[in-house]
Amino acid sequence: MRGPVTAKIGLVLCRIVVPLWVLSGAVFKLIERSPRTLPRETILNVADGLGLHLYGLLATLIALEFLAIAVMVFLGRFARAMALFMLTAFCLILVGEMILPNTQQLMEGNFGVLLGGSCGCLGTFSPPPWVMLMIDGTLLGGVVLFKPTPAAAARVGRWPVATALVVILAGFGTSFGLVIPAGRAPDTTPRNGPVQPDDPSVNPAPTALPGYWFASEVESWIGKPWQEIDLFTYMRKWPKEMDSVKRYVVFYSRTCDHCEAMFLEDLTDPALGSMVTAIEIPQSKSVLTSSDPWPMPDTECELLALPLGCDWIITAPLTIAVENGNVTCATEGDHIQCMGLAD
């Protein structure tokens, strides 16, 4: 579409609206400074498979967002191309986040699974991917339909290149200066509350905490003794009776809706609860429980917590079934399968 009005709309989209939208995502990531704000299926899993340092990756992606903002705002000739590139990339990532973890259910015709999840685009409390896809898709459609005139797109400040370079350098400096230090473990002393020295559940030699913990394939734990799972080595106090006939360990968050439903619907059952150790995932490196958690119901579960000082990147609930000391099932984002509760 061409014309004075559509050209102005295109100019506003490419030079103001889209840069502000990209900036909002970069700011939220800088506030939280955690790789958990990155899309899991399309970025975190791939990065983990390649052995990339997740904090370094996070800093790089935020810096590139600042680069894109500088180009769109100050280099009008390239603003529309950059807006198209960024929005197309966002949409493809969101489609991947919706489809990749739900392939089997989609093949079975269960399209409702597309409405859940979180992409991390705006931090820990991001809306579901389909909401973000609607926003990004609408912006992308607007950029495609409303094309600014070359003359209008070129009208920028006196020193656009120099200004863009300053913004890019500031963005890179801010991203790496804030994110990389956040990836270091400030306190590598594992702690899980006071324990008795003669308690058989005490880990005699807990491993020093890393800056972050993430595992892209928890299914690889199946068949291994539970002591070989590194997640347990960081704990000072182990779940009880892990070498008995059958035990369940579930890592949960007090801000996870699925976790709340799990407790209310299943773990209030004394028979099942007595077989479960529920381990709380800290809200951040320095805070165990969020300031607005859901209330913990009465349960027979053993309640523990992962130690503070590490960025635990876990899709809750992470559920592990153990029989005679060996892992028989491990899933993230679900407890039904490993606890055998499917109809």
Image: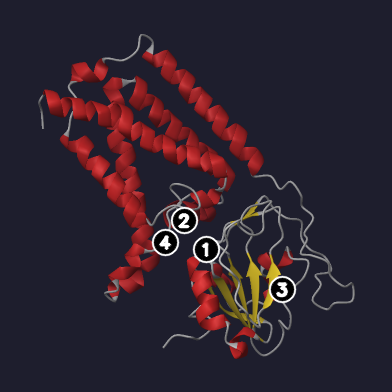
Mark 4, other Cα within 10 Å: few <14 / some 14–19 / many ≥20: some
Which of disc 4 and disc 2 is earlier in sequence?
2
Q: Which dot marks residue 117?
A: 4
Please, what is the three-letter code of the amino acid marked with disc 4?
Gly
Which of disc 1 and disc 2 is earlier in sequence?
2
The reply to whether callout 3 and callout 4 are in contact (CB within 8 Å) is no
Which of disc 4 and disc 3 is earlier in sequence?
4
Residue position for label 1: 315
Image quarter of residue 119: bottom left
Question: Foreground mark, 3 or 2?
Answer: 2
Which of disc 2 and disc 3 is earlier in sequence?
2
Which of disc 4 and disc 1 is earlier in sequence?
4
Q: Is residue 200 left or right of residue 33?
A: right
Instruction: Please tell me whether mark 2 sits on a helix, a strand or a loop.
Output: helix
The C terminus sits in image quarter:
bottom left
Q: Is residue 203 left or right of residue 3?
A: right
Q: Which dot marks residue 40?
A: 2
Mark 2, other Cα within 10 Å: few <14 / some 14–19 / many ≥20: many
| Outermost residue toward the right in this view | 197
Residue position for label 3: 227
Please, what is the three-letter code of the amino acid marked with disc 2?
Arg
